[in-house]
Amino acid sequence: MSDLTHVELLWLEKRIENWIRFGRHAREQILDQRRRILSFAPGCIFAFVRWTSNDFGTLISRIDILRAVGPGEPRATVPYVQPGGDILLRSSGWPKVERVLQIVDAVEGLGIDPADAAPDYWHHVHNRLSVNEAPRAYTRSRHQVWLKRRRIAP
């Protein structure tokens, strides 16, 4: 059994669109033209976006920012993610998903890969957005503190 977290991506134009917004995958398996599986090593942080529609409009619009877990670690189940992951942020409904994507863009605008941002920041964003409050911006100084903390307490 693999220690990797596997995410099945499916792309049926204007029907089902599952994609990874950020994250460093360890392996990719192409199943066919529309399906592939990306695998992430334990500890990797990634954003998984799911969008589904029918003839009448959007049915599902969701983003999950997850940390891939190792063997024996607690995990939550997420559709298309095996065996699951540590949920740092979960948001649904296009306005909220769009807001999360804007926040991801802002982190990238600092020259920081969102996969390297402090996991606590994604929890903060989740908590603030869930009560319709604006989250604090991620900053270079906050990122430097996270990098130092990670070095002394892995």
Image (cartoon, rainbow, N blue to C red):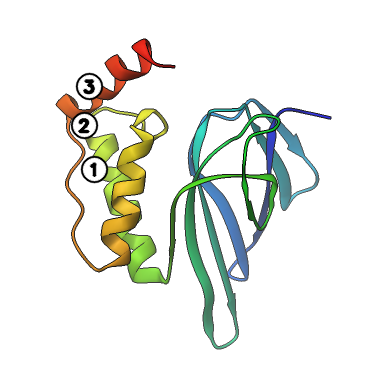
Res. 70 image quadrant: top right
Residue 76 drawn above or below residue 3: below
- The reply to whether the C-beta atoms of the residues labelled 2 and 1 are less than 8 Å apart is yes
Q: Please state if 92 lies on the left or on the right of 82 as rendered.
A: left
Quadrant for the N terminus in the image: top right
Res. 127 image quadrant: bottom left
Residue shown at 36%/18% (left/top)? 150
As helix, strand or loop, the secondary structure at mark 3 comes to helix
Q: Which mark is residue 145?
A: 3
Mark 2 to mark 1 CA distance (whole Å): 7 Å
Residue 141 drawn above or below residue 34: above
Q: Please state if 31 lies on the left or on the right of 151 as rendered.
A: right
Please name the residue that numbered disc 2 is placed on. 110
At label 2, the amino acid type is Leu
Mark 1 Cα-neighbour bin, 10 Å: few <14, some 14–19, many ≥20: some
As helix, strand or loop, the secondary structure at mark 1 comes to helix
Q: Earlier in the sequence, mark 1 or mark 3?
A: 1
Residue 92 percent coordinates (x, y): 44, 67
Residue 79 percent coordinates (x, y): 66, 58
Quadrant for the C terminus in the image: top left
At label 3, the amino acid type is Val
